[in-house]
Amino acid sequence: MDSRIPGFYDEPRERRLELIEDRCDLSDEASDAIAAAAHGDTCDQLSENVVGTIAFPLSVATNFVIDGEDVLVPMAVEESSVVAAASHGAKLARQTGGFSTAVSDPHMIGQVQLRDVADPQAAVARIYEQRAAIRETANDQGVLVSHGGGCREVTARVVDTPRGEMVVVHLVVDVRDAMGANAVNTMVEAVAPQIEDLTGGEAVLRILSNHADRRVARARCTIQPETLAREDSEYTGAEVRNRIVDAWALAAGDPYRAATHNKGVLNGMDALATATMNDWRAIEAGAHAYAARDGYGPLSTYEVAEDGALSCSIAVPVQVGTVGGATRAHPTARAAMEILDVDAAGDLAGVFAAVGLAENLASMRALADEGIQAGHMRLHAKNVARDAGADDDLVEEVAARMVAEDDVRAGRARELVAELGEETDRGGEADRGGH
Ligand code: MEV
């Protein structure tokens, strides 16, 4: 197979798919799957070399109260139990008023890297002397200023690199309701010649930083220990609370655990980013860079409050926009925004932080009590039941039986589908309702 396809990007989407069908000897099933999914024309505009679309399940997480308002959260994710966990975390928090959020100004950083600067420290001083002029050049670009945003600060420092000392200039830009990458990149490219003149160096990189530590969203909630008690648990609510705090402490002391802890947070945030077509790679990069600012650690914190409640909090950079980009272009992303009913990027950032915390709280609760597999198994069992041919009426029951028997296998699912299906045929709906 030859991966060179000259002019591929110029072909219409249908022709591109035909070319891939030929090269990869695709089955009809595969071709149909690629061609069938929705919003092909929109997606063709969003990316390059598009041959089709891939549909994620779009779910809605329930139970969220954020800053006193009920919110339904659209989430697109392929991993079972992520949406259930977010809804569960939100339900725990709901009993004490839900999540409170606080979001910083939407300040993103753009970098200009300068090499071959003869007098780096003095060059830094010259940048600070001329910072008003640099800001002015930056603010002459684009539309941010007319929307109340723009370059707020210019800073400079000397960075020691494997290729010697370099001067790095930061523009701190208020991007308002945009994600901000385009606006910031335009600004740093525009100021680079001026900065070269001031430093006598040569600009290399002129690009946004995804270490968005000036654009941080916080969320917190309080959980009473009684809320953590479960009838079939071997632990009291207070014990589960303490086990959660111990589990968090391991993440604070051990990056091997912190990575998984934060993966749980990002399970929720990425799913919301995907549903609203925000750049989840930026969210991931920013979250991990922020988690690593003092040595890699957890994004969230669990403490015991004076009254014995579990205090849960999170601080995480959220670089998302509500204007422009795929969020506006893609019909399903627009629909997701309609479900959320949020206009300002700051409010959206608060929802992201709350969802990250809810997701993490549910994982922590399960891990500290019955373990994660019981819930996963219930959901997995439903998929196995469905694959084995259980129709909508039988899925729950086949899954429940396999979980109770601790035997979640395709073979057992097929036996149960046959057995229970026959009972249904004999006894009808009324009998099954009695189980
Ligand atoms: C699985 O996708 C996420 C968890 O591993 C997160 C965690 O361990 O905290 C359950």
Image (spheres, grey):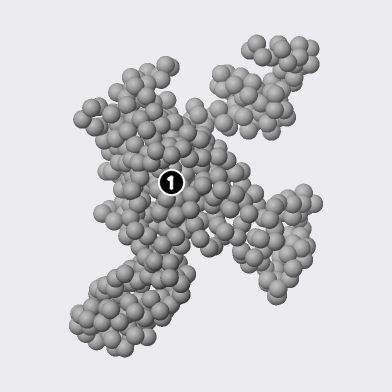
At 74% from the left and 52% from the top, the residue drawn is 36
Asked whether 357 or 413 is in front, the reply is: 357
Element at label 1 = helix
Asked whether 227 or 408 is in front, the reply is: 227
Work out which quarter of the rendered image holds the N terminus and state it: bottom right
- Name the residue that disc number 1 marks: 351
427 displayed left or right of 174: right
Q: How many marks?
A: 1
310 displayed left or right of 275: left
In this rendering, is residue 265 above or below 404? below
Residue 224, located in which quarter of the rendered image? top left
User: Where residue 277 sits in the image (x, y, percent)?
Assistant: 55, 55
User: Where residue 97 sits in the image (x, y, percent)?
Assistant: 37, 33
In this rendering, is residue 34 above or below 5? above
Residue 303, located in which quarter of the rendered image? top left
User: Where residue 301 sits in the image (x, y, percent)?
Assistant: 30, 41
Crowding near the residue tagged with mark 1, few <14, some 14–19, many ≥20 C-alpha atoms within 10 Å: many
86 displayed left or right of 387: left
